[in-house]
Amino acid sequence: MNHSDEIVSSHRTTWELIPWVVNGRASAEERRIVEQHLAECGDCRDELAFQTRLSSAIGAETQPVADPEPALQRLWQRIDGVEVEAPPRRRVAGLPLARGLLMAVVVEAVGIALLGGALWNRTAPQGGGPYVTYSEKAPVVPGATIHAVLAPDLKLSELQSLLQQSGLQIVGGPGDSGVYSLAPLSASAVASAATTQAQLERLRANPAVRLAEPIETAPRRGS
Amino acid sequence: MADNSRELLLLGLTAQGDRPSFETLYRSYHPRLSRFLSRLTQRQDLVEEVVNDTFWVVWQKAGEFRGTSLVSTWIMGIAYRCTLKSLRRSGSALSEPLADYEDPAASALQIEHELRDWIGKGMRHLPLEQRTTLELAYFLGHSCEEIAGILDCSVGTVKARMFHARVKLRNLLPSLGGIKERDRYEPLG
């Protein structure tokens, strides 16, 4: 390769590398090649200046971006719509053994509590509420549609996220029994059975929710 | 790019159905992805649709990510494919320029936002794949190899697209380079 060919080759290489020097992604060796050629090539210095100005202009973004939260909520609705039809197996298969064992213990404990509650209810005086899951009855708060028991190590931010995703708010609890009373987030929301069922499914899909049960709104016995 | 280990962790937890991790990823990508898609498609009505299409795939396929590329490359690749599908669905042309180029007045360069507007017009004159390559390099700072991964093409193709985009922009925006209209740019060789 003669000197003229070397110049052309160096020019081509440099011209090709300029964008990656401009955006900071060229390697040290590539930068060295470019710097060496720039010292003797006015065209490539012009091109570097042009691409630098172009990059600055493209990178200078002033357009405001929409709040991601409403879009994220719509995505959850879409995902949950799909998962109701076909829950991904990985959600269970991917659980670590320890968490699986913990859930087994929780399920067993809940079963015992349900059995105890049922026996208690059988002998309870007339006028007790229909929701009897625990050894100590959870009070029914006006407007509440769901009773839930949450993992004690659930972080506040996770709780807030869970409630927001589910469209629920805490209106009572946890009290001594550890039972939260949850109500629809919007005051104007109609607590239909379908809505409550969807919220229950969303709560139950979260491993941090140990138990979630609907609060029946039928008239109390004996009233 | 430096956040790849953190994003790997978030993606791994997402694969196990961990919603807070998925939401962290979503919120992290939403601003840059929205801006990128807005510039790429010039269709504000498609931006949320494509962002959510992208992250719907991320939620479904997180368990299939094998770590052979950066998480950002994987997600941007999904976003690009979702963009193409969305543009096809909406009947937008994929390879043609988005609008006729209007030769701007030289005085437009006096003000910075007008300069950006001018460049925006020049960018819209490029075919989608060339525009995407430039945006990925200059707006999102991806390397040549990462762009090849995102666009699912060879490094040589990325270089060729970048080459044509630069030549075309150089000729559309001569004043930006401090050269006169009559001096059309022809790279040596």
Image (cartoon, rainbow, N blue to C red):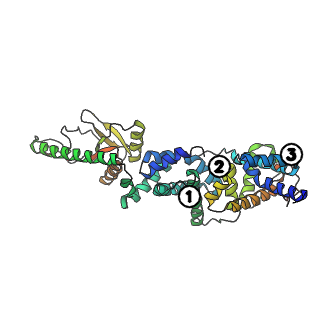
Residue A194, located in which quarter of the rendered image?
bottom left
- Which amino acid lies under the numbered mark 2 shown in the image of this protein? Leu
Q: Is mark 2 on a helix, strand or loop?
A: loop
Q: Are marks 3 and 1 on the same chain?
A: no
Which of the two discs, 3 and 2, sits closer to the camera?
3
Residue at 66% from the left image edge and 55% from the top image edge: B145
Q: Is mark 3 on a helix, strand or loop?
A: loop
Q: How many marks?
A: 3
- Which amino acid lies under the numbered mark 1 shown in the image of this protein? Ile
Q: Is mark 1 on a helix, strand or loop?
A: helix
Residue at 72% from the left image edge and 59% from the top image edge: B159
Residue A11, located in which quarter of the rendered image?
bottom right
Query: Disc 3 designates what residue?
Result: A39
- Which amino acid lies under the numbered mark 3 shown in the image of this protein? Ala
Query: Disc 2 designates what residue?
Result: B140
The residue marked by circle 1 belongs to what chain? B
Kindly report the distance in space between the C-alpha atoms of the residues bearing marks 3 and 2. Answer: 29 Å
The residue closer to the viewer here, B2 or A87, is: B2
Horizontal side of A57 relative to A116 (left or right) equals: right
Q: Do labels 3 and 2 share a chain?
A: no
Q: Is residue B90 above or below residue A105?
A: below
Q: Do labels 1 and 2 share a chain?
A: yes
**Badge 3: residue crowd in 10 Å (few <14, some 14–19, many ≥20):** few
Residue B146, located in which quarter of the rendered image?
bottom right
Query: Disc 1 designates what residue?
Result: B78
Q: Is residue A62 above or below residue B103?
A: above
